[in-house]
Amino acid sequence: MALTRPIWRLMLLLLLILAGLAGGAAGLHASGVTPDKLLASLRGWLFEPGLPAGLAMGNGRIEATEVDVATKLAGRLIEVRVQEGERVAAGEVLAVLETESLEAQQRQAEAELRRAHQEREYARAVEEQQTSELDLARRDLARLERLARTEQFVSAEQIDQARTRVRSAEAAARASAVRVVAAAAAIESAQADLDRIAVDIADSQLKAPRAGRVLYRLAEPGEVLGPGGKVLTLLDLADVYMVIFLPTAAAGQLALGSPARIVLDAAPDLVIPASVSFVAARAQFTPKQVETQSVRENLSFRVKVRIDPALLARHEPLVKTGLPGVAYVQVAPTAVWPSALEPRLPSWPSPSSD
């Protein structure tokens, strides 16, 4: 039986390792080839296809932003309107919580609001009465003072009593004005409670925060959930990407927005255009302090390759997360894409076509 290419390459690797061991570490050192460099070269020769200069590659899986649809308040779940895999629109009602307790609180708040309005009307009437009494007391005092100046029969005691009545009426008028302000504040408080309850009732209808596809259905009708209880998990199909890891030399030259290509293992004949949307500021899985240049050259940086949302919208039924594949990125602006990596997309009608 003829040996396949991976098998004879593996055999050749074993032979080279045995030869290196037979030659000894002194021979490798004399030739300037360290064991690490030898293994790295053989690993790339065995498993990585050759790329034109200015391009780099990495393995990853298709991912999408996940959004949890959760409860704001505790309550019993009475309805879940979608199933896993269904497409939902932004703002669509996906699940409903029981609101009987909130509706009772709403009726109580409405009653409190009516009572506060009545108290304000009563306070205004009292204020008007106290203002009239103050005006009468001031007129009586002025009349007595005028008579006293014309030497009429007015005693000092009468004038003192009139002044006391004026001061009492002024105090009552101020108190009635304070009651009017307090009644107005009570109305605002009751209205605020009513608005809060209305918001809670509205939040009992769990809506999709954005358009997407239902990934998981995590709760069923009849379950009692606490605040923050998850009901559904959505996939944002407008934010689909692949995360790869590139060595220092490639990541250091990579610019945000650089062109990229994604090839999935499940569809090797398709080439999906994308672009670099993120490059990590720190290397992954490395010591805190790296002193030697050889180690620094082997560090890997996390890179996110994102697919254009407009392209995703045209091929949304085919978008699936978790699929493994390879992402190629253009490290040098002058690098030329080989013909094998020219974009090739499936023939699939857009969701809006007939």
Image (tube, rainbow, N blue to C red):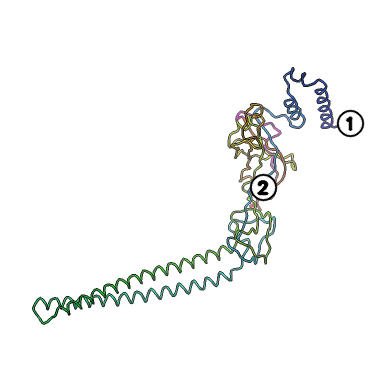
Image spot of residue 9 (x, y percent): 82, 29
Residue at (64, 35) in percent of width and height: 287
Q: Which mark is residue 20?
A: none
Q: Quadrant of residue 49?
A: top right
Q: Secondary structure at mark 2?
A: loop
> How far is disc 2 from disc 1 in space, using C-alphas?
42 Å
Residue type at mark 1: give it: Ala
Whether tag 2 and tag 1 are in contact, CB under 8 A, the answer is no
Q: Nearer the viewer, mark 2 or mark 1?
A: 1
Residue at (44, 75) in percent of width and height: 115
Q: In this figure, which residue is indicated by the disc labeled 1?
A: 2
Q: In this figure, which residue is indicated by the disc labeled 2?
A: 315
- Relative height, residue 66 to residue 77 (above, below): above
Residue type at mark 2: give it: His
Left or right: 311 with respect to 266?
left
Span shown in magenta? 332-345
Q: Residue furthest left?
A: 151
Image spot of residue 85 (x, y percent): 69, 55
- Seen from the viewer's position, the closer of residues 100 and 127 is 127
Q: Is residue 68 part of the magenta span, yes or no?
A: no
Q: Residue furthest front?
A: 157
Residue at (91, 32) in percent of width and height: 1
- Seen from the viewer's position, the closer of residues 285 and 278 is 285
